[in-house]
Image (cartoon, grey):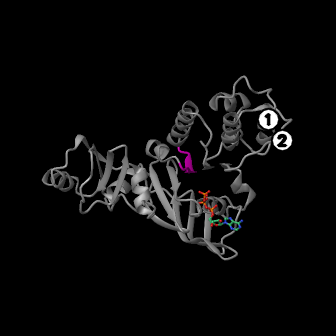
Amino acid sequence: MQDELHTNRAGNGSSAQPVASLQSVYKHFENIEALQGINLALFPGEIVALLGPNGAGKTTALNVLLGRRHPDRGEARLFGEDPRKPEVRRWIGATPQEISFPPTLTIAEIIDLVRVHYPEPLARLEVLKRFGLTGLEQRQAGGLSGGQRRRLAIALAFVGNPRVVFLDEPTTGLDVEARRELWQVLRSYASGGGLVLLTTHYLEEIEELADRVVVLHHGSVLIEGSVDAIKACVGLKQIRFSAPALPSLPNVARIVEENQRYCLYAIDADAVVRELVRQGCEFRGLEVLPTSLEDAFLVLTGDEH
Ligand code: ATP
């Protein structure tokens, strides 16, 4: 498992050079240490999820990688160069967390406006099709629904035919179907060699999509590895059952109760079940389940209570 954790290689095992990296990057804002010596290396063909509680430094890390913020110390590299260089930025696409468009421009006009900034943009029709915007091209941005606006913002990240896309909470506000469609687009982009770095608060999205997860906490990398490696590192199991009351139990990390249905988190589920039996607990509907990424995340960041 340790081999899977802290790995700095692409999921396919290649030893390619990173297309984007942060080396010992520090960034502060007034008295806030937003990034505290972050190292990150991102490789072609990967989907990497940047996770962390609010304020952990995810957006700041993205902004440093994108050349929008300059590190106080350390170095950011895109294709081996300073990300502030315009010629480097031509090959990246990004979707910010907050999006707004000129309300009177149509979708077609907005796409064309972005296309002209890139040397080898995708055809407008291709962009519309890929992001489920076909038929909406003459719609003014001011008349789009929240989900349509979000799809347009994501589409614009891909318009320049980038080799790397940075997506800050891309699926916020998308319905389930649109979210799944976007996952498919991202998978197919990565399988063609593109690199995706995304932040999200939807942990289910990461379980579905990410080859690698980097958990930030207080501006540092807390842990890094595959979804399974991170879950295994936490090593908790869920023990679920209904019971009229819960006896006092040792070695249980967390207890959640709703209407006499309990969910216990423990490393040794067998021992907990044996203890329930020993104490004569009248449990029903017992299930022992692996930990979700969400549980692992809460335990890792110490926010589980
Ligand atoms: P969220 O999940 O809420 O989007 P995040 O992990 O993206 O959070 P950042 O936006 O990178 O976190 O912020 C990291 C820390 O730096 C926070 O404490 C934030 O308040 C602070 N910060 C970020 N940008 C600025 C700024 N321009 N001025 C002052 N403080 C800032």
Amino acid tagged 1: Ala
Image location of residue 147, percent across then percent down: 66, 35
Q: Quadrant of the N terminus?
A: bottom left
Q: Which residue is the site of mark 1?
A: 141
Taking the spot 58% from the left edge, 34% from the top edge, the residue there is 175
> Between residues 192 and 197, which one lies in front from this camera angle?
197
Residue sticking out furthest to the front: 244
Q: Could you tell me which secondary element the residue under label 1 belongs to? A: helix
Quarter location, residue 56: bottom right
Location of ligand 1 given as a quarter of the image? bottom right
Q: Which residues are magenta?
A: 193-201
Residues marked 2 and 1 touching at CB (< 8 Å)? yes
Amino acid tagged 2: Pro
Rendered position, 280 above or below 29: above
Instruction: Left or right? Give the position of 67 relative to 107.
Output: left
Label disc, if present, on residue 102 of the rendered structure: 2
Q: Is residue 177 visible?
A: yes
Q: Quadrant of the C terminus?
A: bottom left
Taking the spot 33% from the left edge, 48% from the top edge, the residue there is 263
Is disc 1's CB within 8 Å of ligand 1?
no
